[in-house]
Image (cartoon, rainbow, N blue to C red):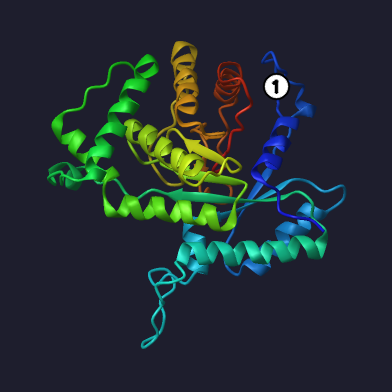
Amino acid sequence: MPHLLTGRQLKKCFEIFCPFEKDGTLKPEDERVTILASNINPPVDLQGRAFVMAAAQGDQSPMIIQISYNSMNLAGGKATHFKPPAGVIRQNYPPPAVDGAKLTVEVLEHLINQYGAKYVAVSLDHFNVPKFNFDVLSKAPVKKSLESELAAVKIKDAIDFMEPAFGKIELDDKTLNAYVNFLSSPEYQEFKRDFLNVVAAVKPAWGMIDTERLPPVLVFAVTKDICDAIRKDLGNRDVMLEAELGATGQSGEEVEYVKLRGKDLENFAKQVALFIKYTGAEGISYPIGMVHAAKKGEKHEPDMEKLEVVQRTLLLEVGEYIPFAQHGG
């Protein structure tokens, strides 16, 4: 009877399909593959059935089925996502994100058994942090608490670690206040609690920490905070955690993608390697010119040179293959 892949089993799949030789030489194109990751939304039995049947075709292929934070809250009946009729109240327990994730995974477990799919893995996709509003957070006084003191320590630790690749970073009082207020905010604590509870409940093979709209210092601090909580507080060393450095654009945005070359590209690759070393993440995402929600007929060519340089640098500096997760098209 098939079971959903564990994080270590999924990691083994990535190692088998690593596009580089051990010395960093790129393998021939016909030996390089992409593992498909498909986003699932309610009704999960309909979309999930299609994905699982695709994974079970022929000799079978690995398939990652992604449950977004939004999707699990929708499946879990969160009142802000699925408004109940008058007189009906969504109970506080079980928590929407956790219950929605459990419901989705339970359906997928039934489906992989129905079709004998051997290589299906579950991922938490776009588990996005709260919005960072600099104007509001920088003006609000920092409340003296254990959370704010810990936040300040985490920010300083991130800044110190970043210096070799990012240069010396000095924060003015307003910026430091904004960062501390963000990390100690109830909204961030809720996000963190939901992430940990969902990982504990469904034991996904992969989990994405979506920080794409945060400033770099907070990206480092938040990603490490979540990774440490998963590994140390939960004791979960199975799930592959995906970190994100830089934002993938959205269709319709007027922000032009700038290609990095030469020293600029080398420096960016070192920044990514430093990020992985600091956080302990096992998957990585960064912009290569693609966009989310690309419209029909809208095409964006991936920056293959950047992808190759950064991924090779990761392999050689980190000492293991760190798979790249492409978001958008």
Which residue: 83% across, 53% down? Answer: 57
* The furthest residue to the top: 263
Is residue 8 something one can see in this rendering? yes
Which residue: 38% across, 81% down? Answer: 89
Q: Give the quarter of the figure containing the N terminus.
A: bottom right
Above-or-below relation of 13 to 114: above
Above-or-below relation of 255 to 186: above
Q: Is residue 306 left or right of residue 214?
A: right
Q: Secondary structure at mark 1?
A: loop
Q: Is residue 173 left or right of residue 13?
A: left
Which residue: 70% across, 28% down? Answer: 18
* The furthest residue to the bottom: 87
Amino acid at pointer 1: Phe
Is residue 17 something one can see in this rendering? no
- x and y, in percent, of residue 36 in the image: 68, 45
- x and y, in percent, of residue 95 in the image: 44, 66
Residue with the mark numbered 1: 20
Q: Of 276 and 329, which appears nearest the observer?
A: 276
Q: Of 219 and 266, which appears nearest the observer?
A: 219
Image-quadrant location for residue 241: top right
Q: Of 241 and 235, which appears nearest the observer?
A: 235
Which residue: 67% across, 37% down? Answer: 11
- x and y, in percent, of residue 208 in the image: 51, 44
Q: Of 261 and 319, which appears nearest the observer?
A: 319
Q: Is residue 182 left or right of residue 191?
A: left
Q: Give the quarter of the figure containing the C terminus.
A: top right
Q: Is residue 313 left or right of residue 24?
A: left
